[in-house]
Image (cartoon, grey):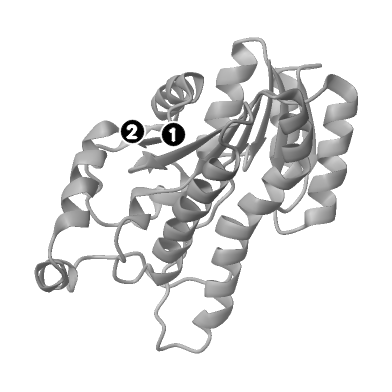
Amino acid sequence: MKVVITGASSGIGLALARLYLERGASVAAFARRGELLQVLAAEFPEKVFCYALDVRDAPAIQRAAGDFMARVGVPDIVIANAGVSRGTLTEYVEDEEVFQSVMDINVLGMVKTFQPFLAPMREAKRGTLVGIASVAGFRGLPGSGAYSSSKAAAITYLESLRVEMFGSGVKVVTLCPGYIKTPMTDINTYPMPFILEADAAAKRMARVIARGTAFAVVPWQMGVIGWVMKRLPRWLYDRLFAKAPHKARSSVA
């Protein structure tokens, strides 16, 4: 098996990379922090191919994709996992740059990740494209305008891509994690129901990917919460969430 994973230096991406490597896969690990990728490479010599890059850099992704495919062939699975979460408030002009960065990484980074692999996978008539979205994309959360909107956009983009790939042999899977214990959530100061360790989440996600399920929430309990949230009338949603705790504002990603 051949797998490509972005954001593979920590969190969900690292847990997925380790899981597939332990199962004997050849893994292309993309991440900005090259030094952390080298730690992974030392654990799995000759099985992991490390590419230090930023998913906002389309030419860098294209070069890495070309190199990996030249070495091991067309991937079976491409996981667009790289993402950032930043607290934002529209009233602050300095947050405009943060909004831009979050959207560029979480949405356009996914597009740029998939693009070099689409034609080869379509020609091979096989493969699975996996986008990591979030339950946070189901409704707009206070203080998370950038993150919630980026994940909502990712969910809709992945649906469009799934329809485009219909009948091609290439599957598109949308994964919406709830709370997963990662460096991204470690800074949260509010309750995080049903939180999962990254390794446990990776195992559940791998099962979804293997089945080729079009859309899934991990853990499933957060899917129930998300279902309820999406169906709350606006007046009630506004009252319930207006004073909800949220992530503090932070600098540009």
Observer-nearest residue: 180 or 111?
111
Residue 61 in percent (x, y) is at 79, 47
Observer-nearest residue: 121 or 175?
121
Q: Is residue 253 visible?
A: no
Provide the residue designation for mark 1.
214
Q: Is residue 15 above or below residue 54?
A: above
Left or right for 107, reference 178:
right
The residue depicted at 44 percent of the width and 88 percent of the height is: 92
Q: Is residue 236 above or below residue 75?
A: below
For the C terminus, the image quarter is bottom right
Is the residue marked by circle 1 packed among few (<14), some (14-19), or many (20+) residues within 10 Å? some
Please state which of the two labelled residues, at mark 2 or mark 1, is closer to the viewer. 1
Residue 153 in percent (x, y) is at 48, 60
Residue 172 in percent (x, y) is at 54, 36
The quadrant holding residue 181 is top left
For the N terminus, the image quarter is top right
Q: Secondary structure at mark 2?
A: strand
Q: Is residue 86 above or below residue 131?
A: below
Observer-nearest residue: 250 or 235?
235
The quadrant holding residue 73 is top right
Residue type at mark 2: give it: Leu
Left or right for 170, reference 215:
right
The residue depicted at 50 percent of the width and 89 percent of the height is: 93
Residue found at the very far top of the displayed protein: 24
Number of the label disc, if any, that sits on residue 200: none
The residue depicted at 38 percent of the width and 39 percent of the height is: 180
Is the residue marked by circle 2 packed among few (<14), some (14-19), or many (20+) residues within 10 Å? some
Residue 247 in percent (x, y) is at 35, 64
Residue type at mark 1: give it: Ala
The quadrant holding residue 2 is top right
Provide the residue designation for mark 2.
196
Left or right for 82, reference 175:
right
